[in-house]
Amino acid sequence: MPAALAGFFIVLPLIAILARVNWSQFWTLITSESSIAALSLSLRTATASTALCVLFGVPMALVLARGSFRWLRIVRSLVLLPLVLPPVVGGIALLYTFGRRGLLGQYLEVIGIRIAFSTTAVVLAQTFVALPFLVLSLEGALRTAGQRYESVAATLGASPTTVLRRVTIPLVLPGLVSGAVLSFARALGEFGATLTFAGSLQGVTRTLPLEIYLQRETDPDAAVALSLVLVVVAVLIVILARGRGTEGSL
Amino acid sequence: MSTGALDINVGLADRGIDLELQVPAGQVVAVLGPNGSGKTTLLSLIAGLSRPDTGRVVIDGHVLVDTDEHIWVPAHRRGVVLLAQQAMLFPHLTATANVAFGPRSQGRSRAESHALAGRWLDAVDATEFADRRPAQLSGGQAQRIAVARALAAEPDVLLLDEPTAALDIAVAPALRQLLRTVLRDSARTAILVTHDILDALALADRIIVLESGRIAEDGPTREVLARPRSSFAARIAGINLIAGITSADGLVTADGTHFFGMLDPLCVSGEPAVAVFNPHAVAVHLAPPTGSPRNNLAVSVAEIEPRGALVRVRSAENPDGSAGLFADLTAAAITDLDIVTGQRVHFAVKATEVTIYPTAGDHESGRDGDTVGAGH
């Protein structure tokens, strides 16, 4: 009975959105200039931040799963931090790092690089919140796969890079894919950190979630239609992640 | 021709291991011992999968580990391949790609590696599985391919960690036969960890017995099995072994005695073999028996020793110096027979209780042959 209630609790709001969609105007609403700009920006930035997550997350997961040094537990907790941190706080933190007067930003400013309130900032904010999803998913896969195949490969004469390329990565590929898909989803839905760190400038930093929030004030129909688009994307992502046959750690 | 002379002197304090072992090139050494005696650790020290606290590992004069000199050659540059109980084929690669993995990793071209893999799959009689993935193979098939993969890497030293233990009884003899062929036909040094004395009998020139991380016994296979000195070897061995040459229905010993038994499928007539039978299967008679047992030996009693509920009667050594035979009797039977040391008695064994196995020893002539499949 409580399980059925939980299911109801998840499904009912989705039905509520479907019920509220203005179907006759649907296509017009989601193809308006601002909608298209937001959707395209969202897809581009989420793709870029997923790529960054893979680039930084794979070495990170390898260190966490295979490393054995004193501060490993602390490092693992730090990696998890963006997962539990309120996104707004993440955005503030990024602002005081990369902003014009930030820890790094003041030096970047000197060489003419401004990150805050740019598309780059959107990507950084999304990467910040999405990275733990990839790292956790991949670390779990690496631990499950174990090191025995790697040992076999090494005795057959494979150098560490060959082992990584031909054995480790292929073995954890399902975990890597589901981690990347989850990171993409998280990046696509990112709101708080983006708004704080990157602002809301149409075509530059106003991603789909920001557009929805903004439209809700002026044109609720457009907000609902765009919400439905994100619901569809989310459902597709869930199907994709499950379809890879991974009961990932997340 | 032979490569892989091994010289090990290692200590690993927390595992209580302190071993010194020299293996001449081309020799096959079986390592026996109770669980936790350090057998698998010995293999991983040679393979480079674990580090000794102190000591040296040298192959063909090439120093792989020297703790004093801070020398450490990583596993992938040692020329040592480990074949484990599980085949551990890479699940994402086909059988061919698995076998080609070693040559490929060692820098051979794709085409060359592929051709080599084909030849090795042929050598282990697994060509039909070339395009299959490990999930589509049975345990025995996978282990054959693991053998091909290990040998395709052309190791100087082959390490085998209970290679037949995970296979079911129907498949193990075939794999043992395969290993016998590849170890005989190549001049390769091999260290074989096993619990199965049949593996040792069929494959090894020499047996070492480990107990608590130290070598408790070291000697030629047949001698250790027939005349075990360490308590472990005595427990698992303690069997009767008679060496000879395989005949149509048993074997003929050096002094011409014919011994009847059941031939193992691997036996080849005219090849060296041993007759193996349990001391429980031996009946002791005061007069020459006239019943059905076909094997009947006149011996003199050298020793009568109680062993738990049974009494073990050992016959005197043969004139050629080979070990005497054992008969296990109940205490009541000994009392009835009233035998004493020095007495002449007859040991009778039914032919069905005797198994004839081919032996690994005495095949030096076969060791000069080229490597199977992969001609140099």
Image (cartoon, coloured by chain):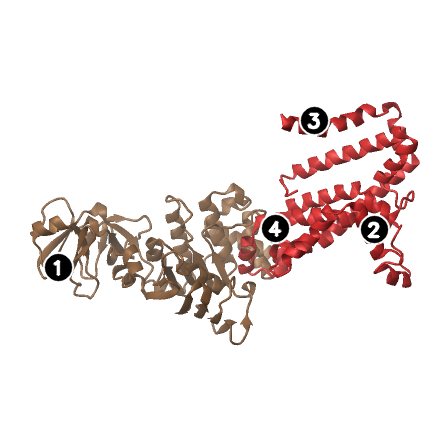
Chain colours: A red, B brown
* Mark 4–mark 1 distance (CA, rounded to whole Å): 63 Å
- Residue position for label 3: A8
* Mark 2–mark 3 distance (CA, rounded to whole Å): 36 Å
| x and y, in percent, of residue B371 in the image | 45, 60
Residue A142 circle label: 4
* Mark 2–mark 4 distance (CA, rounded to whole Å): 33 Å
Image side of residue A183 versus residue B16, left or right: right
Q: Nearer the viewer, mark 3 or mark 4?
A: 3
- Residue position for label 2: A92
| Location of the N terminus of chain B (image quadrant) | bottom left
The crowd level at tag 1 (other Cα within 10 Å; few <14, some 14-19, many 20+) is: many
Protein chain holding label 2: A
Say what amino acid the circle numbered 1 marks.
Val
**Residue B24 can be seen, yes or no:** no
Image side of residue B300 versus residue A93, left or right: left
Within the image, what quadrant is residue A103 found in? bottom right
- Residue position for label 1: B301
**Residue B325 can be seen, yes or no:** yes
Q: Which structural element holds mark 3?
A: helix
